[in-house]
Amino acid sequence: MKNIRRVVSIGIVCCCSLLFSVASTYAQGGSEGEYSKRVGRVDASLLFGGLLALGSGTFTTSCDCLFDAGLSGFGGYGGAGISYAVTGDIDVLGRVAYQTLAATYTKENTALRYTSDGSTATVVFRREAEMAYGTLAFAVLGRWRSGFETLWLAGGPEVAILFPGAYKETEEIISGRGVYASTGTRNILLADQPLDEQFKDMRTVGVSLCIGAGYDLILDKRLTITPELMWSYPVTTFLPSTNALRHFPLRAGVALTVQL
């Protein structure tokens, strides 16, 4: 599972880098199109890209292990959007996107354990927790075209619906003598279940503030391709109030936009 996530993550990054490069090369080649600033203009977009899961806080599992968050995982997203030009430089932008996230947390503990001959030994354990889930996010953003080339800035609220995935927790003896009696090996499976069974009172709806920026590369008068970077700050968390884990998705992707 880890190798699959690693390959997928590398593939997403490579694809995004390639698209950025191609789009930049095209723009430097000198497209003759100009972006319309007509009031009432309506644009439709397709979105896709990868995300980096930044985290903060802690969470406790049913195995009574406390994990700290941090840089925890990767994922991807895809969706669509529509915008309406309120003025020449200000749009109202609505978006819906489905995103997936897979995060891994590790922690090491040292303890004294009895061996089969009745003596004690110092053992170092590594706990690892893996969680995966998806969200369907709806955002309403205000977008301002800065006047610096075709750079724009955007921000607004985002509401996400949670689709719980899987949860897995393992423990491994990484230093010291001994094996687990139940497995006869130095590894043991502590949990392997749906995420909402591990955290039984998970919330199914979350609210975030979303900000971001993009740079429109004009292909012609009606078509643009936009490398963009978006970041969401969770006002609420999917985990219960006794847990403080929050994910801050940092999304890098591309939007292909058609003027209707």
Image: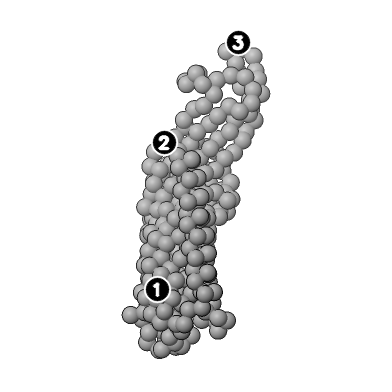
- Between 121 and 23, the one lying in front of the other is 23
Q: Amino acid at mark 3?
A: Asp
Mark 1: few/some/many CA within 10 Å (<14, 14-19, 20+): many
Q: Residue at x 47, y 54 (%)?
A: 12
On screen, 135 above or below 174?
Answer: below
How far apart are the two marked residues, 2 and 1, measured between alpha carbons?
42 Å
Q: Nearer the viewer, mark 2 or mark 1?
A: 1
Determine whether the residue tagged by mark 2 lies in a helix, strand or loop: strand
Q: In the drawing, what numbered circle is on residue 117?
A: 3
Q: Residue at x 55, y 84 (%)?
A: 147
Q: Earlier in the sequence, mark 3 or mark 1?
A: 3
Can you give x and y, in whole percent of width and height, for residue 250 in the image?
52, 60
| Number of other residues with Cα within 10 Å of mark 2, as a class: few under 14, some 14 to 19, many 20 or more | some
Q: In the displayed structure, does residue 51 sit left or right of residue 97?
A: right
**Which quadrant is the N terminus positioned in?**
top left
Residue of label 1:
257
Q: Which-is-in-front pick, marks 3 and 1? A: 1
Circle 1: residue type: Thr
- Image quadrant holding the C terminus, namely bottom left
Residue labelled with disc 2: 192
Q: Residues within 10 Å of mark 3 (few under 14, many from 20)?
A: few
Q: Are marks 2 and 3 in contact (CB under 8 Å)?
A: no
| Residue type beneath disc 2 | Asp
Which residue sits at x=39%, y=46%? Answer: 165
Specify the farthest residue to the front: 29
Q: Position of residue 241 (x, y in %)?
A: 49, 53
The reply to whether the C-beta atoms of the residues labelled 2 and 1 are less than 8 Å apart is no
- Compared to residue 121, the image places residue 34 above or below, namely below
Judge whether 19 appears above or below 64 on screen: below
